Amino acid sequence: DGASRPTSSVPTDSIAYYILCMVGGILSAFPAIVVCPIDIVKVRLQSGVYSSFLQGIRSIIREAYSEGSTAVQNARRKRRPLAISGSLIKLVGECNNCTKGIAGRHGVCGKRSEAPCCCHGKVSSVGGEANEVSAYPSPVYVMFRNALSLISTATFSVSLVLTFVVEALNVLLVGWPPILIGHGLQGAIKYGIYEVCKNVYASWFPASFVLHNPIILFMLAAASAEFLADLFMTPFETMKVRLQMASRRVPFRFVFPVICRMEGIDGLYKTLLPLMCRQVPLTTIKFVAFEQIVRLLFSLGIAQRMSSVQVAILSGILAGIICATMTHPADTLVTKIAFLRSQGGASGSRGGAEDSKANAISVVAIVKQLGFKGLWGGLLPRLVMVAMMTAMQW
């Protein structure tokens, strides 16, 4: 719709336009990092760790505060005087062996000097004999000492704040590396291939059909792009869920080799089918719903009283709510399958008919186990998460 978005100076059928769309898709991974805490609550709700959305939010905030406070207390206990002070003071002429001032001589070494000494004042000699000077610290030394003490205190306070923030974020952003990589790859392929497919599919149909049925073209292009994107996203989605459900902190670099050793490469793609059942309809509905909501806002005269950014945010929120609601059961299955495998229900050793039977996860059996109500577990945090992501991406 020409009124809903600014026109681009780059031709929409050019390579440059496709590259720009892919770059925008990569950048769209960062909103997924912003909503990562809500994603953690959603995953743990679907796994049965939390019983409600509010309980999950309170628990994850308490956990983040506890981790940050513990790290700060440990840093305080281990604090030692900064060695940098002495090094800086030596730059203004302090003797390595200097202790207390003695008239005309350094405290220990006894060396005569006409150079200024930071801790004894100026030492001078007349006819080879030292004159008596004050043994109190010089103003230069006092200035440096006070400045370094202030810097040391301020630096340590800042380091404590940074320690708290980093440790808290380690709790609130569990699984962010696979989220960033997975959503970056998915976004690049989804938004780039989507534009390619729109132009390709438009050339396959008569111009009159494309003009009167743009929604069908949008749906076909979105579904095709998401299908390809999910092939790259699935392994990282599996690793993300494993990290977020782990009972203790696990480094990201260990997840891939552990899954491959215990379950093989196919363990990374065990959630491919339910993930596609979630992502392909989600993307299709998101793209079509966004376009139709924008047109509806303009037809009702609402968009004329809003800025383009406000129209995009409102349309993104509404489109996110619609697509998240319609695809939530598939999202629950993705989490549940990964949870069962991580708990050993399907992660036994490979080989043997017995092990193969134990490793086989029946989606139908999981659906029966969860029931209708269980399939909608964690819907509220997912609505918030997808609506926020869609609004920020658009």
Image (cartoon, rainbow, N blue to C red):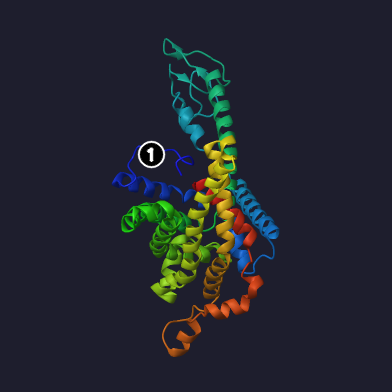
Q: Residue furthest front?
A: 208
Apparent side of residue 154 relative to residue 353 in the rendered image (left or right): right
What percent of the width, then of the height, locates residue 292? 52, 50
Per the image, the residue denoted by label 1 is 8
One can see residue 318 in this view: yes
Name the residue nearer the viewer: 25 or 101. Answer: 25
Name the residue nearer the viewer: 21 or 105. Answer: 21
The residue under the point 46% across, 49% down is 28
Apparent side of residue 389 relative to residue 53 in the rendered image (left or right): left
Examine the rendered structure and indicate whether residue 368 appears above or below residue 209: below
What percent of the width, then of the height, locates residue 356? 45, 85
Tag 1: amino acid? Ser
Name the residue nearer the viewer: 274 or 88. Answer: 274
What percent of the width, then of the height, locates residue 92? 45, 23
Residue 162, quarter of the rendered image: top right
The residue under the point 55% across, 42% down is 298
